[in-house]
Amino acid sequence: MTAAFLGVSLASNAFLFAFAIPNLFRRLFGEGALTSAFIPVLSDRLQSGEGDAAAYRFVNQVLLRLVVVTVGLAIVLGLLFFAASVYFSHRLGEDGNWSQPMAEQWFLGSLLSVLLIPYMPIICVTAILGAVLNTRNRFAVPALSNVLLNVGMISALILGGLTMKLPAEQLVWWLSIGVLVGGCLQLLSALVALWFEGWRPRIERGPVEGMDALMRLFIPSLWGAAILQVNILVSRLLAFGLNETATTTLNYAHRLIELPLGMFAVAIATVIFPQMSLMVSSDDREGLIDSYGHGMRLTIALIAPAAVGLIVLNEPIIQLLFQWGRFTSEDVALTGPLLLILAMATPMYAIITLNTRAFHAMKDTRTPVLYAGVAFLVNLVASLALMGPFQARGLALAGLLSAVIHAALVVRGLAKARPELSKANIGRALRIVLVSSVGMALVAFFASEGIEALFGTTKQASLIICVGVIPLAAAVYFALLFALKFEDRHEVVSLTKRLIGKT
């Protein structure tokens, strides 16, 4: 709906830029490093025998500190963005190196940032409340939290875009208000649910057991998460300052590669991580080799066809999903090459995810942070070098280069730390997946070319390709896996069915 009502426009870029700031801190203080450290400590407090009262005292102290930090950051950032909007307002109408559209984009982005900054403390507190509910086996409210945000955003788009037919430059204000309304609904739902669990908000005085343990876990995790999020933010800033299309087109391309990464790479790493942790703790070298090899084979076998599909069929997929309303065929042509490049990086991201979890299973959080820092520097330098001659494609190529180097570092580093992992049967699996992927790519390419020759590059052709060619190509891929006797072929099919069924 955002694509349909905003298209690829100055206003869309400005909204995505403004929304990126609270999302960065949400992933640091809400759903990211803080939550990862908070849940184990809270679980210990609940199991300590001191009852819910002691656990809730700990929760209140964490919430108090979180509110103070995030509200303080929101005030500082709000003032900075307001000052930036004043500065850019003076650039409007001036002659100079800045084009007028870029001055307008920075001005609108700064103003929207001032409006959206309050979402940051709201969503961070909501995430912690959701984590508390999860420890009490209350999963529905936290799981449905993002639905409430989407309700707020979709309602704003319908009211402002469909009913009032506002231009994009005005509609983004309604959309931003929809974000705040959705955020308030998220917070309210979590507060009410936890209230019925017996929690009451209080300012707790004096020391509370668990805070030291929380900080010991939180600080190392924060460094790793901060590098990743700053890397994303820097890429967004460079895209925002590049032209009036880069931010939006890169965002939609990233959205499409996040789907297979979330469905397959993260899901597999989440399952394999505790297995590897157990094998390391029990010093079971053979078990560790089996768990790691199994995880790598599954990851490669499931991510490779998704990446191939996005590479070969990038424009039909984008056309079917996004080409509505103000999102035009020209916007599809701009987004397609970016998706092609980023899809090539998808297997690298999946490998990074699993191998980083392997380091964590060995209780080594320092090494992955160092590798992430190197990847950040590579991305920054490559982005600055390539964005001039290649525009948005240069930023995507920089991301690809960074991902390749990052993946190579974690694989090589893990092999040095655990030489026995070289015995994992991955080389043969790679060759089988490569051959199967090539066969799938050929089928997808020639079938899509034939359909476009009959129907042209139309929405009808895109529908036929997505509904018909993608299942056909997937069937060819799995048939080749079985024919070549891929070691985990039965589990690949079973896991695919389970994960698709859950979505």
Image: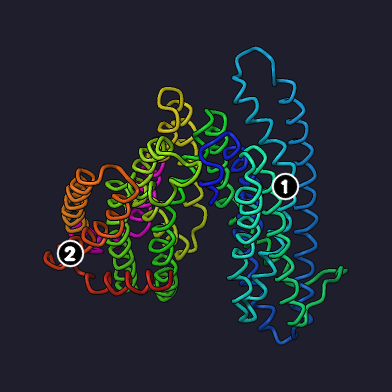
SS category of the residue bearing label 1? loop
Q: Which residues are magenta?
A: 402-429
- Above or below residue 353? Residue 319 is above
Q: Is residue 260 visible?
A: yes
The residue lying at 60 percent from left, 25 percent from top is 101
Dot 2: within a 10 Å radius of its alpha carbon, few (fewer than 14), some, or many (20 or more) residues?
A: many
Q: Position of residue 84 (x, y in %)?
A: 73, 30
- Label number found at residue 456: none
Residue at the left extreme of this rendering: 483
State yes or no: residue 382 in magenta. no
The residue lying at 77 percent from left, 35 percent from top is 82
Query: As shown in the figure, which amino acid type bears the numbered disc 2?
Result: Leu
Q: Is residue 394 left or right of residue 211?
A: left
Looking at the rendered image, the quarter that the C terminus falls into is bottom left
Q: Looking at the image, which is closer to me, 418 or 443?
A: 443
Dot 1: within a 10 Å radius of its alpha carbon, few (fewer than 14), some, or many (20 or more) residues?
A: many
Q: Which residue is mark 1?
A: 117
Quarter of image, res 472: bottom left
Q: Which residue is mark 2?
A: 481
Q: Looking at the image, which is closer to me, 9 or 124?
A: 9
State yes or no: residue 416 in magenta. yes
Q: Position of residue 501 (x, y in %)?
A: 38, 73
Query: As shown in the figure, which amino acid type bears the numbered disc 1?
Result: Ile
Q: Position of residue 328 (x, y in %)?
A: 44, 39
